[in-house]
Amino acid sequence: MQAIQIFQHGGPEVLQFIDLPTPTPGPGQALIRIEASGVNFIDTYLREGRYPATLPYTLGQEAAGTIVSLGDETSSSGFKVGDRVAWTTFPGTYAQLAVAPVELLVHVPAAVTSQQAAAAMLQGMTAHYLAHSSYPIRSGDEVLIHAGAGGVGLLLTQIAKSLGARVLTTVSNDEKAGLSRAAGADEVILYTQEDFAEAVKRLAPGGLHAVYDSVGKTTFEKSLSVLRRRGTVVLFGASSGAVPPFDLIRLSQMGSLYVTRPTLKDYIATREELDQRTADIFRQIEHGKLNLRIEHVYPLADAAHAHRDLEGRKTTGKLLLIP
């Protein structure tokens, strides 16, 4: 089979398209023929060495496909050969075939395509836990979503609006502003034309209940500054770099603020929670209440191109690789 591996850390040029032996599922695992694999910022962090990875390493942590074989200790798992499944938070999906623990698999409904399922697993569940759990949005809340035209940003905007929030977003250009408004944003701020903190204070003078920040280093301080008393920054990414060390006493000085740094695996830590989140996301897709924007589909061999596009902020919505 063919796959994308890295043998050293670095830029997109270190991604290698190679032949590998077909993996064999171990106990509690399934072998899946991949039909679509998601491209995410965590893949670039692992490629760069920002997150640890044992080399050589097959990138990718999100995919959908069909089970072709099962290992031992899976008879009571509820899965069988031929089932359409999706999964995330387990590496090795930049490949034609991959093994994954059955405990991480979810069934894909007939009305949801493999591309939709792959696009929804990491970003869809991220948007879900951000809006429902990290800071549970209530009707009437005012929230800011950075990178409002990105994959998570577009989904989070739709979910936040469905929960009754007034949603402000930041984007870099007019095209992205249009996409953010189409997703339901009430106010869209072009951070390339004005300081987003000044714009927020003008648009929401009472301060925000929450800021959802996937950018990190360049936005964190100003994200804190636009909160109302006891407001929350949900820092769930670092596309501009890691936030520098921060003295927690400042949170009390700025209004008894909250900061949380969540990650998806802790919000799907039980089978019940995983099934509940995916069922909710797939149901909304089926009923047309959650619109996925799959912007570009690349052949697996062009994974480096996908990484360059993602890191160059040339994309909106979701990027997929097709083996």
Image (cartoon, helix red, strand yellow):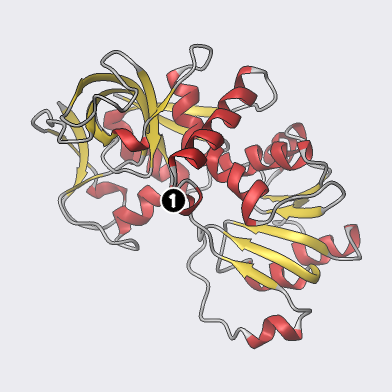
What residue is drawn where x is 53% and y is 72%?
A: 243
On the image, numbered disc 1 is attached to which residue? 265
Q: Image check: 289 left or right of 273?
A: right
Neighbour tally class for label 1: few under 14, some 14-19, many 20 plus, Cα within 10 Å? few
- Rendering quarter of residue 53: bottom left
- Rendering quarter of residue 254: bottom right
What residue is drawn where x is 52% and y is 62%?
A: 240
Q: How many marks?
A: 1
Q: Position of residue 257 (x, y in %)?
A: 72, 74
148 in relation to 114, above or below: below
- For the question of whether residue 312 can be seen, the reply is yes
What residue is drawn where x is 42% and y is 30%?
A: 320
Q: Image check: 138 left or right of 5?
A: right
133 in relation to 303, above or below: below
Q: Quadrant of the N terminus?
A: top left
Secondary element at image label 1: helix
- Rendering quarter of residue 83: top left
Q: Residue furthest front?
A: 76
- For the question of whether residue 315 can be seen, the reply is no
Q: Residue furthest left?
A: 21
- Amino acid type shown at disc 1: Lys
Q: Nearer the viewer, residue 175 or 299?
A: 299
Q: Image check: 172 left or right of 261?
A: right
